[in-house]
Amino acid sequence: MGAGFSGEVATYYARHRRGYPPEVLDALVGAFGLGPGDTVVDLGCGTGQLSLPLAARVGAVIGVDPEPDMLALARQAAHNTARPDAARPDATWLLGDDSDLPALGRLLGDRMIGALTVAVAIHFMDRDALFRAVRPMLRPGGGIAVVTNGAPLWLQDAEWSRVLRECLERLIGHPVTGTCQTDGAGRLRNRDALVRAGYRYAESLVEYDAPLTIDDMVGGVFSAMSADRLPSTPDRATFTEEVRDALGGRDRVTERVRVWLQFGTTGSARSGRPSASGRTRPA
């Protein structure tokens, strides 16, 4: 990530990136037997889309990200989402990246973690080094979860996605092909790296349909750009209207969201784990 996800890009990320349905949290908790006594490290936490709901299921979450603006918005979200009559999610926010895991392990000392999560950020990391480095930090039955929150908006198998891609390519002047390693090839790299590091592998898929507004569609695109490549404010407004017009004036479409969870688990699990073909389709 780095400084490219600063400023307005971080704001787009906080406002327009999807969160996670309860079924995803259920899968994470079940895979590692997580509970109130566990600490989870959410690496590449961004603005807290996974960290905060997960913090309500476990003892504490440590959100780690290399972008200060992302962490500032995560802290703000943690404050805003806590009801006056409810306990605030136990979340701590640290500036860092995957290369800082050994230092975090030294800070934790003898305190082991229940899981390390990496949600829509593994393509920025050295998988092999990361999966080896975190292993001594994991309690028995704990592990790593690599989470993919749907395919990029511009690469989905839907008419609205093709329209978005065409408009985006006119905006930036070249073809858009980036997968963020969310495709089958990316998941294969995750699986192979987890197996090489000695983890037991399993995966699960949560699928659901959800409305996607034009503002969220466009905001999601801008959240994936580096700050220095973000179009001017007038150009962003023009792009939004071009997308809306190309979609026949519609204000929203339906997105088929596929959340892949890839688990690498250590031995002596506290509870059962999902099978390699486990699937959930929330209503």
Image (cartoon, rainbow, N blue to C red):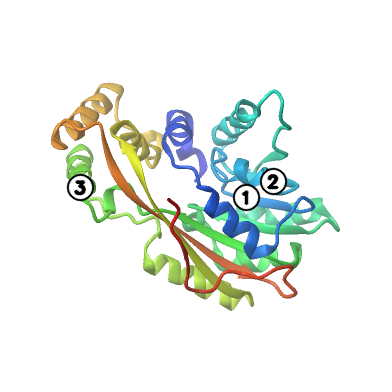
Residue drawn at x 51%, y 75% as measured from the top left: 192
Labelled disc at residue 61: 2
Q: Which quarter of the picture shows residue 267?
A: bottom right
Q: Earlier in the sequence, mark 2 or mark 1?
A: 1
* Secondary structure at numbered mark 2: strand
Labelled disc at residue 42: 1
Per the model, the C-alpha gap separating discs 3 and 2 is: 40 Å
Give percent across and percent down for residue 17: 43, 40
Which mark is nearer the camera, 3 or 2? 2
Residue drawn at x 20%, y 35% as measured from the top left: 243
* Secondary structure at numbered mark 3: loop
Q: Are marks 2 and 1 in contact (CB under 8 Å)?
A: yes
Q: Earlier in the sequence, mark 1 or mark 3?
A: 1
Give percent across and percent down for residue 119: 52, 52
On screen, residue 51 versus residue 155, left or right, reads: right
**Location of mark 3 (residue):** 174
Q: What kind of residue is marked 2?
A: Val
Q: What kind of residue is marked 3?
A: His
Q: Are marks 1 and 3 in contact (CB under 8 Å)?
A: no
* Disc 3 residue crowd, few under 14, some 14–19, many 20+, Cα 10 Å: few
- Residue found at the very far right of the displayed protein: 110
* 277 vs 217, nearest the viewer: 277
